[in-house]
Amino acid sequence: MDSDKALELLKASGVRVTSDGGRHIAFLPERLVEESLKTVPRSYVLYGRGEGVEARFERGNPPLFGPSGVPHLVFENETCTRRQAGINDYLTFVKLLDGLSNVDFISPPCTFTDLPEETIDFATFFHLSNTTLKPFSIDFSNDYGFRAVLSAVEILKESVYGGKPFVQFGFCPVISPLRLDHMGTDQLIDTAKAGIPVAPISMAQSGVSAPVTLAGTLTLMNAEVLSVLVVSQLARPGAPFLYGTIPGSTNFMTGDLLTASPELPLLNAAATQMADYYGIPNWATAGRTDSKMLDIQAGYEQASSIPWVALAGATYISAVGGFLQSVNVLSLEKFVIDNEVVGLVKRILKGIGTDDDHFALGLIHSVGPGGNFLAEAHTARHMRSEFHTSQISENSYWEAWLENGKPDALQRARKKADDIISSHAVPPLPDDIARKVKSILPNI
């Protein structure tokens, strides 16, 4: 434990702490973990600015989908080059995420590099709240921005959201193995005390910062997440908490981090089952790729992970991040492709209706042998809800595809992105409220 605030809370609860040369180790008793699991909420809701827009973090509900991760590079598909992300890229990506139909919840999509470092956290928060109608998450790189955002949240909560919660704070206080850092843990404690939901994560890497075996990595991540849960509940019993895991695996030929190996959906599914065992909502990851460009590898790595984590019952899955190159680079087209894959998964999760109307026994009898169902009212009534309609897949006749210029999937994804960016309207915050928020840290 590097956090004095956490150490004070733990010692006050009877936790044994040993200290040696400035290194403090806390031994969390089973009793305290069980007490914390009793006080942590089973669910919580975040509300968007849009009418009826909400994200319900609750076990047993269909998964929520959105992004997570803040690369500072943008991939230009036409030239196969990378460049630094700027504030205009950030605004474009947020607007796109707000307009994508399968994105339920938004976090900052990138780190922009054209503003002073001390203002980035606050600018990230302000422009997110000003550019989306969906509930969202925010994380922090420094304490200066964290304090400014805390003040801004109070203003927006009362003046725009009618006192309802609309944002959660994401943290990575864990330095695997088994260490909680100073800044992230302090911020988590203050966030919990403020009544804002906290979403801390373990990012253990198998064979490097965690045991090489999957069971060992899962055990380590679980202990790390539970330790943060205990701290959050000591800070404020009943503080909303999201059990978060972003494991990594290792290429033992090079030592590089892998984000798309088949072991990672296994770990995320297993971590989901641990959170389910405790009865608390969780955040899992899927849909990532180690490919350097938008190619077949990016497609099969992404699509092979999302269904398994979703079918495991994850509460929130960060799978619409637009990522390439092991979460180092963003692609405009990839956001749209991510959204498409998530749409397919949502349809699978919807399952098969099994009431009398869906079994359609009477209709089968009335149509009889040799008939057809195309002109039946039952078909018209169910055809849109029963079948997924792709937003970018090519399913026309060959001749029609030729006449349309033979567009490939990337071209169709780019067109979809451009259409949303040019036409999707997001009303900004009211001028007086925007001025009040910006006055906290004017240089954004």
Image (cartoon, rainbow, N blue to C red):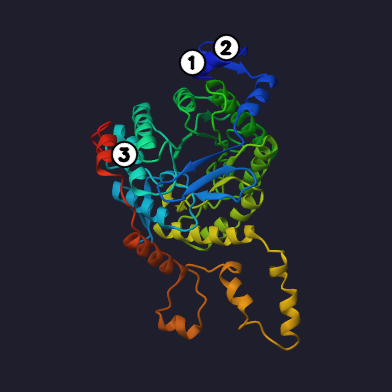
Q: CA distance from mark 2 to mark 3?
A: 37 Å
Q: Amino acid at mark 3?
A: Ala
Earlier sequence position, callout 1 versus callout 2:
1
Is residue 366 in view?
yes
Residue 84 position in % (x across, y down): 32, 48
Which quadrant, please, contains the C terminus?
top left
Quarter assignment of residue 370: bottom right
Residue 436 vertical position relative to residue 366 in the rendered view, above or below = above
Element on which disc 2 rests: helix
Element on which disc 3 rests: helix
Element on which disc 1 rests: helix
Q: Which mark is residue 123?
A: 3
- Alpha-carbon neighbours of circle 1 within 10 Å: few (<14), some, or many (≥20)? few
Residue picked out by circle 2: 12
Residue 285 vertical position relative to residue 345 in the rendered view, above or below = above
Is residue 78 in view?
no
Q: Which mark is residue 240?
A: none
Q: CA distance from mark 1 to mark 2?
A: 12 Å
Residue 171 position in % (x across, y down): 48, 33
Residue 103 vertical position relative to residue 57 in the rendered view, above or below = below
Q: Amino acid at mark 1?
A: Asp
Residue picked out by circle 1: 4
Residue drawn at point x = 50 percent, y = 29 percent: 173
